[in-house]
Amino acid sequence: MKALVYHGPGQMRLEDRPMPFIGLATDAIVKITKTTICGTDLHILKGDVPSCQPGRILGHEGVGIVAEAGAGVTGFAKGDAVLISCISSCGKCEYCRRGMYSHCTSGGWILGNSIDGTQAEYVRIPHADTSLTKIPPGADEEALVMLSDILPTGFECGVLNGKVAPGCTVAIVGAGPIGLAALLTARFYAPARIIMIDLDDNRLATAMHLGATDTVNSSDGQAVAAVLKLTDGRGADTVIEAVGIPATFELCAEIVAPGGTIANIGVHGTQAALHLERLWDRNITITTRLVDTISTPMLLKTVQAGTIDPQKLITHRFTLDAIADAYDTFGHAADTRALKVIITA
Amino acid sequence: MKALVYHGPGQMRLEDRPMPFIGLATDAIVKITKTTICGTDLHILKGDVPSCQPGRILGHEGVGIVAEAGAGVTGFAKGDAVLISCISSCGKCEYCRRGMYSHCTSGGWILGNSIDGTQAEYVRIPHADTSLTKIPPGADEEALVMLSDILPTGFECGVLNGKVAPGCTVAIVGAGPIGLAALLTARFYAPARIIMIDLDDNRLATAMHLGATDTVNSSDGQAVAAVLKLTDGRGADTVIEAVGIPATFELCAEIVAPGGTIANIGVHGTQAALHLERLWDRNITITTRLVDTISTPMLLKTVQAGTIDPQKLITHRFTLDAIADAYDTFGHAADTRALKVIITA
Amino acid sequence: MKALVYHGPGQMRLEDRPMPFIGLATDAIVKITKTTICGTDLHILKGDVPSCQPGRILGHEGVGIVAEAGAGVTGFAKGDAVLISCISSCGKCEYCRRGMYSHCTSGGWILGNSIDGTQAEYVRIPHADTSLTKIPPGADEEALVMLSDILPTGFECGVLNGKVAPGCTVAIVGAGPIGLAALLTARFYAPARIIMIDLDDNRLATAMHLGATDTVNSSDGQAVAAVLKLTDGRGADTVIEAVGIPATFELCAEIVAPGGTIANIGVHGTQAALHLERLWDRNITITTRLVDTISTPMLLKTVQAGTIDPQKLITHRFTLDAIADAYDTFGHAADTRALKVIITA
Amino acid sequence: MKALVYHGPGQMRLEDRPMPFIGLATDAIVKITKTTICGTDLHILKGDVPSCQPGRILGHEGVGIVAEAGAGVTGFAKGDAVLISCISSCGKCEYCRRGMYSHCTSGGWILGNSIDGTQAEYVRIPHADTSLTKIPPGADEEALVMLSDILPTGFECGVLNGKVAPGCTVAIVGAGPIGLAALLTARFYAPARIIMIDLDDNRLATAMHLGATDTVNSSDGQAVAAVLKLTDGRGADTVIEAVGIPATFELCAEIVAPGGTIANIGVHGTQAALHLERLWDRNITITTRLVDTISTPMLLKTVQAGTIDPQKLITHRFTLDAIADAYDTFGHAADTRALKVIITA
């Protein structure tokens, strides 16, 4: 089968690889229909993710059709249309029982990382019963690809952890796909104000289109002042970090209101400064989280109900044969204005 | 001044009454600009509310201008435009400190009940600092009259207590003003489905206009079957009772899903049957609540942000001189299709 | 093997029955070491539980040793000492994913009800990975039998649902084993007062021994007055119903404080009156729940830490051969002062 | 009257000062019976608290008798025995209405900081109705001095924010008075394990005496390894920082379990490093908080119920005339083994 294989920093190739097969009775093999590329895939290509070794098929998002189900799989059968969660969960370990699938002792984020992933014609999904979700008849498959990772990540790590609530003020630092996913799902809770902060005016314009009430281009270094002005000096109740560098995290800490929450989504590669001398008496909360994908069934309901339209995050489409172009387009988002790209296998 | 006075069951008169005056330093006198009539006022007129004695000026909703502020009032001054909460709260007692203003030991629902109310040219507001809310410049005063009682009641007693959540299914029994207020504020949480149940097709049509996804006319006695059909046999996650009679409460208990919540808003005059033999193992929650009006500042933000438009609940307008006509119109809602009536003082 | 078999109302016999065998790969066969009798077993014997048909082996509590594990069982192996949960859960269905194992679509309370139970030498446990808990070396097995049902039931249905909190006042109606389990686990949250209400002075004395601060013998019909007197007229913040008849439920509604919670544990056979005309404005919550056994791992930690001593609930010991005597002793608790009886298989 | 006055870094004097008087109608004058010294007072004396200017009477803790109540005070009268909260709250502003008294717009921590404090014969208490608590007859006044600051601080900032729960593992870094207050109140929630970490073996011994299950002397630089060993490599569910320097905060981040919480109590003077590169995917929460004293009524109930004995934190007693000795003793705690010192006025 065709598969996109990582060969060390800066190197990847679409290759012919053997078909995956059922290893454990709880595995399923899924024929990929559509997949996509995540910012994390770019991190891997930079060599920033040591758990992902050369030879690995990339990708942790996608929808497809069950090609084969192991003998222990009870919820899915050959031919079922399924959504693949970026997180594999056994449903049995202490973390899974607590709803913290991200830390499943035999799962977590392994797809396209420590086991082969979804940017291929077929993929093996471990713990299939608790890592796949059935796609209802007639659903928009492209939209559902956004439910593999980006929407649960924006929602769980940003919106839920950030305690977005009716009437509150939300600030989101970073208007890339993840920041926009947080924006879309923050609107579930009717905040009075969503302030989007980024360096790129195009992305800020997209954010306004998707429901932001205000935008701040932080390239002039005056973002703190701008947010404080918009909030009568109070700051934002919820601040969502969707970039992953010290400067943006530290910006969050300067614009959070007393009693507010900073919800980190960004994947960080280095430490940040935490100004406890200013924050110790501000009654704030800071959260980190690797997405658990516990909200996938709920998100599917909102997509089916038309409450949210994830299609709005899709800007480009490619075939699996042209996946190199897809990476190129996604990797140069400032020029291409790419958000999420759909790859049809 | 002119005031609508209750004179015992079935009797009320617009009369000339002495101006109210500051009794305690924490009182304020408010010149009423706009007020309205509540279903509870009709209950009083039927003689169902013994705490409200003949001679009482009715009304517990309204907006106005501070005419005089007691020496102990620090947050408001003469000339301030204010929203009056139906609940008076001292901010000091154990219940107020817990956010349960409805049970304030020197307040609670006293306006137009145990002290004179707002259907008059002037009203005395006890505990003014913690019972009034400033109206921002340019706000729509008519819309804000809906924040005195009906919107916080629908929201706190129905939506908050009912734990409405993204993707969930809500059923609201009763599409009168309170049920519709619950509907409007339930939408803050992006439920996938809001099923409205009533006997009156006009009100159900209004509910669809305000965002219901489905309606059930219960006049054929088949409401339970209809709701179960709409929910694949599960029932609704949140069921809101907005009528106040045993039959509607008992209906709620038949359509609540396992793990769901019945949030009672209705003012009940008699006991209902609780079928514990069916419910004991269903993991359900039943709540009651007299509105605390703790959500008023938040609701004001959502009105100012345009997230919610309470104007949609207003169907008729009268002057204080014609308040008898207003009662007549509001009291015959099935014929007049009245929801909330605005009375300009 | 020997097993206690139900043969219709009033009839049960210790018989020789075939050994259970692995049906599904996720099953395990457990050799019972110790089991016990639950009030629900008495209900079955009265014919009150139609889902339990004649021919059924009774019992849903116990500890034992894994005799055989199906091919799909990954967490347990032959020889493991295990605690059996009264609730079987697949870990995969919507309810299990929400932590509501009681409503597992292929589990729930089935042991000794719709499938054969634990009052036998061997039992088949479906969904073994998610329905068994490993027993740490050196643990007190008798104490752990209390973790199959009674302690999680008292804790989840009574204490957790009842929102017991530091400094609060708890009233528990019913000082039988379940009420006492609620008492023991209520103490996890340092309530200032735990008032125990029962008709039996012996049980009330036991309650005092286990940490109640006050007792009320309700046989004089003055329990409401007594509780109000103990609470300066306020009532209790948490009221736990641990009997299961209309009179005790209705008592709960009379002694709950404004803002308080009534947490029902009792198994009810008939409807109760809900006095909404008194309760609609009292801001109360009523909950029902079939135990989910989600707290079993936590309870095990508290037993191992010595925070709680479930041995205190054990009053009698029998062998499996003498299980008829055990039922007799447990069924005449008023005379025998039995709480929980241990049966060694 | 006699009062301890701050005269700039390193300087304080017991002096004769004019009696305080009612400024606003909501003020009360309290004759101090007993007061104490807080670590924050030592910070002021080092010149670390710029809001506290020379000439200020120090102290923000104490009990006393109301000597005079302003005309607007309704809850207290001359002669009432009262507990003084270290936080003054108006009960009216947005923050007070949200229960965040620490950020009251006309209060917060002002006593002995921006207004004169309690280390004197008399003190003026602003917002008396919402900043004082009545002392029940017969209560232990010395014990209640611990409720002015240290117990609500340990409880709210450490235990509540840290989400201590039955069966969990708590680690507390710092066994000074605040860390010990966190320990005492953590026990409200029946954690299975409380690990106390400090450099001082005497304080660790005290911690064991007060209910810690394990201690770690961190002077060997091996505290991380020691805590991980005690927790099977997982770390602690709740980690409470009760020191206030970067090293201890950073230690907390190394011993928190996935899904756990770091609750900061320490008053920090400088930034700390936040290793987001290790924490971003660990699902952790970090909280900061200036005590709100919302838990004071609850804590009073637990003291009255005997659930907690704050006397255990008191090591020394002085008269107001000897307050310089009290500071000396408290300031050299390593030598004197002082925890809290009681000063009788």
Image (cartoon, coloured by chain):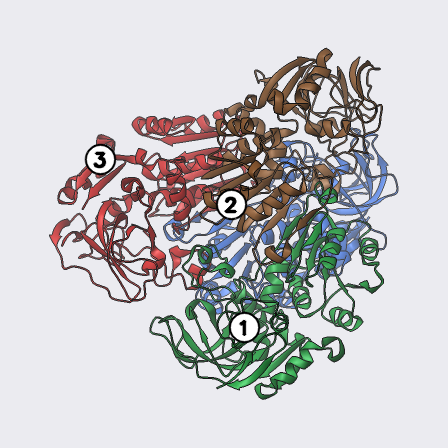
Chain colours: A blue, B green, C brown, D red
Q: Amino acid at mark 1?
A: His
Describe residue A44's horizontal placement relative to residue A27 as left or right.
left
Residue C144: quadrant of the picture:
top right
Q: Amino acid at mark 2?
A: Ala
Mark 3 belongs to chain: D
- Cα separation between marks 3 and 2: 46 Å
Tag 2 secondary structure:
helix
Kindly identify the residue that appears in the image at 33 percent across and 30 percent down. D199
Residue C303: quadrant of the picture:
top right
Q: Nearer the viewer, residue C97 or B156?
A: B156
Q: Looking at the image, can residue D108 be seen?
A: no
Measured from the top left, where is residue C301 in percent x and y? 55, 27
Measured from the top left, where is residue D320 in percent x and y? 16, 45
Please tell me if label 2 and label 1 are on a single chain: no
Q: Which mark is residue B60?
A: 1
Describe residue D199's horizontal placement relative to residue A245 as left or right.
left
Picture layout, residue C192 above or below residue C54: below
- For disc 3, the marked residue is D316
Q: Say which of marks 3 and 1 sits in front.
A: 1
Describe residue D121's horizontal placement relative to residue B41 as left or right.
left
